[in-house]
Image (tube, helix red, strand yellow):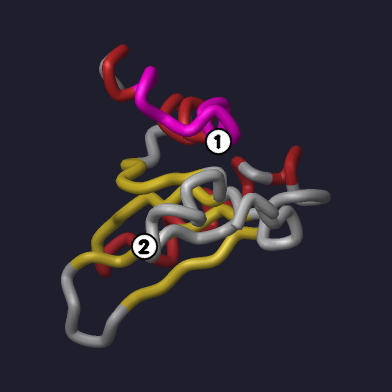
């Protein structure tokens, strides 16, 4: 469960999605709405939320994320990434078609 301080620090363009995923039990660990790309060199220029899981439950969690995201599939993409031999895998929801033009 996210603390109020963490919620307040979330970018406004992804806050609701982070809360939605948190409510559905995903371990969110990174997010952004693209607004910081102009002054934060490593920032993505589009809305995204990343969650983490283990290799043991990667495919199960990716499938679950797909089901949870069904109401948003017209505008959000779902993908997952896992490094062979690694312990932590990532699940991502993003809107790469919504670029922040503040750069």
Residue 10 in magenta stretch: yes
Towards the viewer: 61 or 92: 92
Residue 14 circle label: 1
Q: Is residue 45 left or right of residue 77?
A: left
The range drawn in magenta is 7-17
- Rounded to the nearest angstrom, the CA distance separating label 1 from label 2 is 17 Å
Sequence-wise first label, 1 or 2: 1
Disc nearest the viewer among 1 and 2: 1
How packed is label 1: few (under 14 Cα within 10 Å), some, or many (20 or more)?
some
Towards the viewer: 42 or 48: 42
Q: Is residue 1 in view from this perspective?
A: no
Q: Residue at x 50, y 60 (%)?
A: 44
When the figure is inspected, residue 67 is found, relative to residue 86, above or below; the finding is above
Q: Quadrant of the N terminus?
A: top left
When the figure is inspected, residue 71 is found, relative to residue 55, above or below; the finding is above
Residue carrying label 2? 90
Counting from the top left corner in percent of width and height, residue 92 is at: 49, 58
Q: Residue at x 41, y 73 (%)?
A: 81
Towards the viewer: 55 or 88: 88
How packed is label 2: few (under 14 Cα within 10 Å), some, or many (20 or more)?
many
When asked about the image quadrant of residue 83, the answer is bottom left
Q: Residue at x 18, y 78 (%)?
A: 86
Asked which secondary structure carries label 2, the reply is: strand
Q: Is residue 50 in view from this perspective?
A: yes
Residue 68 in magenta stretch: no
Q: Is residue 57 left or right of residue 12?
A: left
Counting from the top left corner in percent of width and height, residue 94 is at: 60, 55
């Amino acid at each position: 469960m996210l603390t109020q301080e963490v919620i307040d620090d979330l970018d406004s363009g992804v806050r609701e999605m982070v809360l939605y995923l948190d409510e559905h039990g995903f371990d969110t660990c990174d997010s952004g709405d693209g607004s910081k790309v102009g002054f934060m060199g490593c920032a993505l220029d589009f809305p995204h939320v990343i969650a983490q899981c283990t290799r043991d439950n990667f495919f199960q969690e990716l499938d679950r994320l797909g089901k949870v995201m069904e109401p948003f599939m017209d505008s959000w993409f779902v993908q997952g990434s896992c490094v062979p031999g690694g312990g932590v895998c990532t699940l991502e929801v993003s809107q790469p078609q919504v670029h922040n033009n503040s750069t």
